[in-house]
Image (spheres, rainbow, N blue to C red):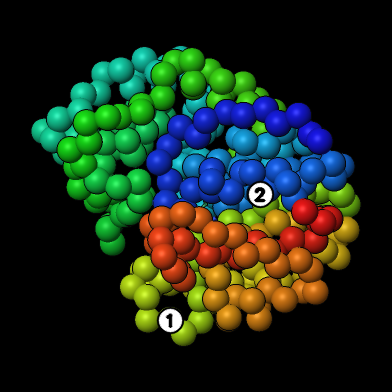
Amino acid sequence: MHNFEHTEPILRWAGGKRWLLPTIRKILNDTAVNNYHEPFLGGAAIFLGTPHLGRTFLADANSDLIEVYKCIRDDYEAVSKTLANHVNTAEHYYEVRGNVPESTRERAARFIFLNHTSYNGIYRVNLAGKYNVPYGRRKHLRIPTLETLKTLSCRLQDVSLKAEDFELCLDNIGPGDLVFLDPPYTVAHNSNGFVRYNQKLFSWEDQRRLSNLVDKIKKADSYYILSNAAHDSIAELFDKGDRLIVTKRKNAVGGLSSERGYASEFLFTNVGAV
Ligand SMILES: C[S@@+](CC[C@H](N)C(=O)[O-])C[C@H]1O[C@@H](n2cnc3c(N)ncnc32)[C@H](O)[C@@H]1O
């Protein structure tokens, strides 16, 4: 069994996969993998909960998010210092939300502050690209400490961080690599409002591109683990003759099929038996 080093995510992130870590660890078990790729990074729960496997390539289409990780990697002390200037009041929140600073460290601290004090962890911008999530009135904040940022910074040293579309990860993938894929969930034909909202972020056409990417990953003799919505259209699109594991999460918010407080999600993988 791998010796799993565990670092806490520093952000609240919609669709965060921390709860999936025990299953991912079981799947990986003793599988020897080379480099690690995570092109839908988000809150980075899986990268942070699994060991360093060769070189690491992380990416997300959200360039503000990637800037935060880069800034922590390169100067976590400056981010922490700037973060300490923020206070959890509605007045301060809206002032910070309304102004995007010039310096990267101030932008990183702003991102972390807004993420922790906003109504929910969802990163939502308006048509003009401005962050527009309301103030959360949250009493118990878990704003990352200097120590947490330092640990994250250590984990990110020598890691490739890119703001780019998921398809580009293929450029660096070689035999024996592991690619963890956790896209926003969309399905074909569903009246669920959550999915409709995500359609704008990740369309059915994107799911098709993702399916093609999985084919290419397999062709490159690499491993993949893909999480996705538990829906017939997804089962069909990603049926590659590999393993389909149905995971159940207690009281998940935004789960697509729920029964008695449980929501199901699919995991597809060509990594060996659980
Ligand atoms: C479900 S979240 C990932 C959550 C992450 N696994 C975690 O544990 O926090 C999906 C991520 O995909 C990103 N994303 C959406 N469209 C993308 C695209 N075309 N290419 C790369 N990333 C994309 C979003 O910005 C979001 O962070």
From the viewer's side, name the closer residue of 201 and 260.
Answer: 260
| Residue 69 location (% of width, % of height) | 51, 33
Image point (81%, 48%), residue name? 177
From the viewer's side, name the closer residue of 166 and 181.
Answer: 181
User: Hey, what amino acid is under mark 2?
Assistant: Thr
How far apart marks 1 and 2 lie (CA) works out to 27 Å
Is 174 on the left-hand or right-hand side of 142?
right
Give residue 34's mark.
none
Image point (68%, 37%), residue name? 50
User: Crowdedness of circle 2 by 10 Å Cα count: few (<14), some, many (20+)?
Assistant: some
Q: Which residue is mark 2?
A: 23
Q: Quadrant of residue 269?
A: bottom right
Residue furthest to the front in view is 260
From the viewer's side, name the closer residue of 102 and 229.
Answer: 229
Q: Which residue is mark 1?
A: 190
Q: Is residue 38 visible?
A: yes
